[in-house]
Amino acid sequence: MQWITKGNQRRKVFSTIVLCTVTLVAANWARARDAAEEVATGAQEQFQFFSFMTSDHYATYERVALWCVLGVAFAGLGYAWMLIGQVKSADTGTPKMQAVADAVRAGANAYLAQQFKKIVVLIGVLTVVLFLTALNSPLPVALGRAGAFLMGSLFSFAVGFVGMRFATLGNLRVAAAARTSFGGALQVGYRTGTITGMLTDGLGLLGGTLIFMAYGEKAYEVLLGFGFGGTLIALFMRVGGGIYTKAADVGADLVGKVEKDIPEDDPRNAATIADNVGDNVGDCAGMAADIFESYEVTIVAAMILGYASFGHKGVIFPLLVRAIGVIGSIISTYSVRSKEGDSGDAALDSVHRGFLIGSVISVVGFFLVGWFYLRFDAAYLLQYKQSVAGYPGGVNALPAWINLGQPGLDLRPAWTCLIGVFLAVALNKCTSYFTHTAYDPVKSMAKACQTGHATNIIQGFAVGYESTVWAAIIIAIAIGASVGIYSGTSPIFVAYGVAMCGIGMLTLTGNTISMDVFGPVADNANGIGEMGYDKAEMGEAQYKKARQILADLDSVGNTTKAETKGIAIGSAVIAAVSLFASFIAVMAMGSEEKISEMTTLQYNNVAGMLTVANPTLFIGLLIGGTVPFLFSSMTIRAVGRAAFLIVKECRIQFRDKEIWAGTKTPDYARVVSICTTAAQKELIGPGLLAIMAPLAVGFLLGPLALAGFLAGMILVGQLLAVFMANAGGAWDNAKKLIEDEPRDLAKNTGKGSERHKAAVTGDTVGDPLKDTAGPAINPLIKVMNMVSLLLLPIVLKFHAVEGVADSGKSPYAIAFIIALLALAAIVWAVHKSKTDSPEMAEMEKEFETA
Amino acid sequence: MQWITKGNQRRKVFSTIVLCTVTLVAANWARARDAAEEVATGAQEQFQFFSFMTSDHYATYERVALWCVLGVAFAGLGYAWMLIGQVKSADTGTPKMQAVADAVRAGANAYLAQQFKKIVVLIGVLTVVLFLTALNSPLPVALGRAGAFLMGSLFSFAVGFVGMRFATLGNLRVAAAARTSFGGALQVGYRTGTITGMLTDGLGLLGGTLIFMAYGEKAYEVLLGFGFGGTLIALFMRVGGGIYTKAADVGADLVGKVEKDIPEDDPRNAATIADNVGDNVGDCAGMAADIFESYEVTIVAAMILGYASFGHKGVIFPLLVRAIGVIGSIISTYSVRSKEGDSGDAALDSVHRGFLIGSVISVVGFFLVGWFYLRFDAAYLLQYKQSVAGYPGGVNALPAWINLGQPGLDLRPAWTCLIGVFLAVALNKCTSYFTHTAYDPVKSMAKACQTGHATNIIQGFAVGYESTVWAAIIIAIAIGASVGIYSGTSPIFVAYGVAMCGIGMLTLTGNTISMDVFGPVADNANGIGEMGYDKAEMGEAQYKKARQILADLDSVGNTTKAETKGIAIGSAVIAAVSLFASFIAVMAMGSEEKISEMTTLQYNNVAGMLTVANPTLFIGLLIGGTVPFLFSSMTIRAVGRAAFLIVKECRIQFRDKEIWAGTKTPDYARVVSICTTAAQKELIGPGLLAIMAPLAVGFLLGPLALAGFLAGMILVGQLLAVFMANAGGAWDNAKKLIEDEPRDLAKNTGKGSERHKAAVTGDTVGDPLKDTAGPAINPLIKVMNMVSLLLLPIVLKFHAVEGVADSGKSPYAIAFIIALLALAAIVWAVHKSKTDSPEMAEMEKEFETA
């Protein structure tokens, strides 16, 4: 393996170039063959932009509706703009508070700036690759796919960047507002979160709508590009942010709490600011980018499948549903407020009431729109032949729960959206049950702390394992119900049903992200209060009251943040399952553009090949199942390695007697910079794995194995992600439960007791699981899905599959070379992930000589 | 849920009866329909026992060969008998040593006696149910299935029981022999293990051969019964033993090491004997029963698929391979010995040399036998039409690596056996790499202990996650290679290839179990030395030397035991994958007996239905994936609950001042009895889950979902089992690594240091994972597989599947009722698994008032 690691920087660049070149050659070969075929079969259709304005398929009101959707997207962005103004103009507190906030903000910005510098190269390269590999499509489509990729990735980054930027402004203002009023502080904090939420809503809707308006029925490939851009950047933001936040957290804890026995957020600890930066980088930027891509991928899936099933109405309806969701979010997030004397519970109620209001608006809205819009007649079915398969008994013979007695009405898309809303609620409740202090699971873990560190961890395993079972069963029921609604129709309709379930699930993305981002904002505000409030200046009473308000808000934020976690992974699974149908459709038709012409027979023909009885597929299934484990192993190790670097730096700074005495400010920036560099470096390995694994499987074992790979990866990814997220969350809250007890060391209760120590161990174990490895699996699932979908047409050309059209010899050698290069990249990444960095090796020596 | 838990004992009995009755009614209905069909189609074949003696399909030498195989099976048993004599006649040491050994033996026997009492009822009921549900077959087959089930379960129990019985005799003799010679002690210990090994070999081979001799081509159902009996009892032995051993271990540690700060095996600790009993109950009885059922299920799978592919030669060949393996084991285990002045390394070399000798004998043997036996000609292919599909180019057109230039020779079955041997070696090496102290993974964990409990656990996650990836990839490669050898033939041949890979893998079961059982024997011997040696009587020098010998052997035993773990789970996956083909065959043909008449077209027709693109199957896949998680959650909790009871009892005994002073012997028997009762009670829940889950899925969602369920369960089960086993093993050895360091608290090395405490936490966390939850997944996979196979013909009758023959209306209500009852049983089991026992609730109160 030495040839890989030796001089690895140069080799890495070299092998990347080789891989890209070979892929391009392969794609080009495939393209040439397609072109030859097309010449043979004659007639290349002329492509026209914005054809919906001239096509007679669209009614005038539909054209207007599409422009309205675009308008709503801008309205969402405008609302975010308005909130930015409100937050910015809020009171910014004292200079001392500002100093703390500035340090956090500077660190966060530095991180994202560096991340952007690294990512921008990758985005550039991939944009060109996507353009070149799409050249077999008409030029505007090829350009569109590359452009959409660029747009998707920039949007994803922007959501993360802007969200984090305002979170780091908002935290100071929450701390400032808390000095005078609970209600004011809640409002500033929640609205700060809403900025990110509405940005996600607005940009996601904008991108999807624009692409459909411009490309119409040719939108498939362009949408894929958009989806891939979003997921890829989300993966990097999630993994990088996750490594950053936990490296800082674990590093700060190890050197502060464990070694030096000083409290968290002690200003002498050089890692304190990095820890606060990490909250923003991980929970704001990472989570926002993650949910943005879920939002984006579900709309991509719904639009692709919508056209292939119901024709253009199937595309416009999800856009309308999303627009209603944006309106619902605007109204409901603005309604969240709190009265003067309120406390945490009332605030939580207000947030939940907001969510409920939004849900009601959305559900009523999409049933109303469905009532008016989802009308189908014989003329429409004649235009879109594929839609006939959705009406096995004829369009007028639907049962009453579908057409409410109105011939031609088809409310099935609305029903599946409703299932999605219920799914979101059920997953929230499930997460809440397993991770909230009020319920048995967390209590049982706090109890297990009585008998030590180990029993707490063991109990966490039991709780986490069980929680993932229920989450999977809830998702299985939702999929089953969505499938049931379309029973008797063709598989594409069924897949559309699942995709619409995903649309319903993410209707209230605005509220979801508000709730999520509110968490780190309140957490940071609490930190600013701790470090920045001036007791003397404020007076004892006001100081105490303000601190209490911040503590309450922090706790509310923890709860709201935790509640939304189930949705992220759930949406990944739903999106992946519905995209699986596109995968089969592409297999059946050989390329993307023809999938709306596919017959049920063609679909079933290919679907029949994807049998678990096929050994190749089964091997793919086995390998797919391993990827989430390998990926998690790598990200967990990355946290450990990065944390070591921080421990080292903090130790050096602690040796400075003035810093230890508290008379000199530690060099916070150095730790922030170490964290930033480490996170950037560490995300390369897992990122490579995510992109290369489908490449290797696809080119080595062929499309059937790739299908099995996807199925195994979705199944295991979902189970593992929920296990890690919930076990981690439960350990965290078990610790909080013990910390809330009255402190009494004799009775072994409260902070500092042996039970508390056991609980802290659990919390530390859970940290990288719940904030790094677990959530990173969401984008992992989607990235591998997108890569597979984009690759499939090329893979199909190199791997003759019985039953799928294949025309003669293929230069399998090229496929083999690509697979080998991809494998080599994975081996290198895995090897890297287990090797100590030079700094660690050095530290190791220190330990040994100590 | 109250109606379930209230008065649960009576309700449990009641609902079991209802469930059995309903199943019987359903089966009967299915039977009546079959009978009607048969009358309609006419001609029921006459069944004849031992038809191979009269049938002209068999050559005389084949008849002789079968009797020879039977003879070898008895030879294996005879060898075990001889070893029993040798072990029994060995020196039994002093009365003090005997007293310790007697206590352990009495406890172990008491446990198994109680377990048998409980199990015998279940065996009885299931024997009747199996008989009644098989009544649509000819009476001798129905009787055979029930009888084979009885035989399988009794054999499985006997292997566990006898093995454990002699392990508890052997440990004393090892301790006695160690007083004079290293070589003698090693030989007694290893031969004690070999008793169990040869019993497994002998009984497994005996059962399979007898059934085939008696039933010939009608053996399918009877073999299933044999397999089911073995797996079911293995599940109970594994789960019960696993809970027992870890409850005793964790309980003893918690109250001894953690609370009272006294060393392990301190005679004042009332749980000491239970802890030693646990080693025997878990590692001897549980592991032996587990490997016995792997041995049994692989032969069942190979025989079923052998007949359906190659005809009777396909059945006889695996029996011959097994017979060769038995001979190889006899020779090679007898060769394991050690010279006078040897130490641990030499002993390990000797054991490994034994394994190598056995492998060489086996490989040479089965290629030789293959050379003479695996000859096929046109006349044979005419007899067995199904075998034609194995020769797409004709029987004389095989490539040279298959026929070595001999027309008609077909060495493919031998090649796949060879792959199996390599698979066993590769899995051993993989396990060894991730869990042995000599390699990086364990070292990295010992290093992580520097920074505390949490980092050790986190590192364990990273190591365990990674290890499961490589194990899965090794298995995937082995499956791929076996499949590749049969490429171009029909799927049944491919499945036979995978099954023969399993046969090859378990060729040296005798050696594998010897190595495994040697572990607890040496461990116990060391305990007997610690408690039973009399320093004064033996003299300082001899005492020290003898103790060193025992310590060396203990360490050798730990290594050999760990090395064999990978094989257990690997064989479960291989067996499950090959049985999956039988599942499809039964689906295609509607019942078991016709599967050898199946055409490739029929197979592919049904296989095509089992597509991951089918939502029902995908939902089954999701649910199947959850079962290993739920099962593990339940078993982990069970350990915790049982350990609590032991802590309670030990605390009470510690309050007796005489016991604490060491002047009075604690009441060891009470703890043993508590452990026994608790383990019996706790295994009901997980056992119910294993049997009821396929029932619920099959009857509620149909056969397609059941197929997905199996695939998901195999995939996730294998990944989770290896993760838990290896992470646990690595934590264990990381602790040992630190314990082997020179003790220096200032440098934080060795026993008692902070690093050691962190390592102990890891070890305790790993205990229930590696010895309870992880290994129990092996029999879980196989039990669910067997239940699904047995159920399938009935499920098929109730669920019309497009493409599979179905004749009209079915009383789906019955299927629904069965599914609901099964679901209720699962819900009850899960609920139970989370409820504190009354004793725990009481203890809880004590804590609170304390």
Image (cartoon, coloured by chain):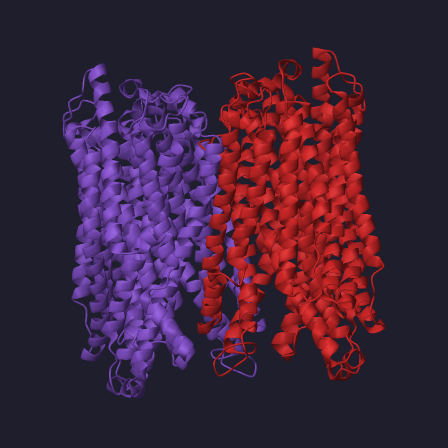
Chain colours: A purple, B red
Vertical position of residue B48 compared to residue A161: above or below: above
Left or right, B65 with respect to A231, comes to: right
Left or right, B304 with respect to B469, comes to: right
Q: Position of residue B733 (x, y in %)?
A: 56, 64
Residue located at (39% from left, 56% from top): A634
Residue located at (63% from left, 79% from top): B261
Residue B370 sits in which quadrant? top right
Left or right, B138 with respect to B752, comes to: right
Q: Position of residue B445 (x, y in %)?
A: 48, 65
Please name whichever residue, A221 or B779, is drawn nearer the observer in this view of the structure.
B779
Vertical position of residue B466 compared to residue B422: above or below: below
Please name whichever residue, B115 or A166, is drawn nearer the observer in this view of the structure.
B115
Please name whichever residue, B81 or A735, is drawn nearer the observer in this view of the structure.
B81
Vertical position of residue A124 compared to residue B190: above or below: above
| Total marks in image | 0
- The answer to whether any part of residue B455 appears in the image is yes
Left or right, A377 with respect to A84, comes to: right
Residue located at (46% from left, 33% from top): A616
Residue B327 sits in which quadrant? top right
Q: Quadrant of the C terminus of chain B?
A: bottom right
Q: Position of residue B232 (x, y in %)?
A: 70, 44
Vertical position of residue B213 compared to residue A509: above or below: above
- The answer to whether any part of residue B21 appears in the image is no
Q: Position of residue A628 (x, y in %)?
A: 42, 49
